[in-house]
């Protein structure tokens, strides 16, 4: 029996919710991820998270729906998921020796008795990358781990060796800030740590 709908196909988000033992069902939603003209990064990531959650509401049968979206910002430039290995290499070269921000929007929505309630939050973590050699970058890209991740790396995977330090939420960099998510879930009486 599920207490929550996760409007995402992300394996990382599934693992993070499983880590805190939330009972959920996945219902991935396709939404237009085009950035609006003049839209800031925080507004963009929050809008996408909410759009994903709202798209799943018709199938939710009164259950709360969690939508989320994560982006990587380097000097104000948005780094999405790389289209190919070459794009992944370019992104990692740009991140080498630099600090960047990982920004996640989370949205928890529920429609009950015709009334829609929406809770939103945005979490930012600063990540400091070590200097990377061309050989390190290319070897990492060849593992395939870059390909479905914003910024072309996974902190919870092989790229852990690239990280000098982080300031803020580790789970946010993985793809879902658990402290803030658990606080939203609490407001909708969705239990964590279920047997």
Image: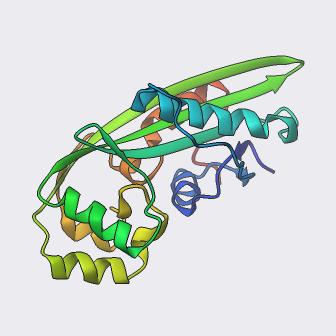
Task: Identify the residue at horizontal 77%, vertical 19% (top origin).
Answer: 116
- Residue 64 in percent (x, y) is at 73, 34
- Residue 164 in percent (x, y) is at 14, 58
Snapshot colouring: rainbow
In the picture, measured across the screen, residue 131 lies left or right of residue 194, that is: left
Q: Quadrant of residue 42?
A: top left
Residue 191 visible: no
Task: Identify the residue at horizontal 71%, vertical 52% (top origin).
Answer: 28
In the picture, measured across the screen, residue 102 lies left or right of residue 180, that is: left
- Residue 142 in percent (x, y) is at 36, 83
Task: Identify the residue at horizontal 36%, vertical 56% (top origin).
Answer: 151
Residue 55 vs 164, above or below: the answer is: above
Residue 141 vs 189, above or below: the answer is: below
Residue 2 vs 164, above or below: the answer is: above
- Residue 66 in percent (x, y) is at 64, 39
- Picture quarter with the C terminus: bottom right
């Amino acid at each position: 029996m599920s207490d929550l709908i996760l409007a995402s196909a992300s394996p990382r988000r599934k693992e993070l919710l499983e880590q805190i033992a939330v009972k959920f069902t996945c219902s991935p939603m396709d939404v237009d991820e085009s950035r609006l003209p003049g839209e800031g990064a925080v507004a963009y990531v929050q809008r996408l998270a909410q759009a994903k959650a709202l798209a799943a509401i018709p199938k939710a049968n009164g259950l709360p729906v969690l939508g989320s979206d994560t982006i990587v910002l380097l000097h104000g430039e948005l780094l999405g998921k790389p289209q190919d290995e070459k794009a992944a290499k370019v992104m990692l070269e740009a991140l080498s020796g630099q600090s960047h921000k990982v920004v996640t929007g989370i949205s928890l929505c529920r429609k009950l008795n015709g009334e829609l309630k929406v809770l939103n939050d945005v979490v930012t973590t600063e990540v400091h990358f070590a200097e990377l050699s061309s050989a390190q970058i290319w070897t990492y890209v060849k593992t395939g781990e870059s390909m479905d991740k914003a910024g072309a790396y996974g902190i919870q995977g092989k790229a852990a060796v690239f990280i000098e330090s982080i300031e803020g939420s580790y789970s946010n960099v993985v793809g879902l800030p658990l402290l803030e998510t658990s606080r939203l879930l609490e407001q909708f009486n969705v239990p964590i740590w279920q047997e």
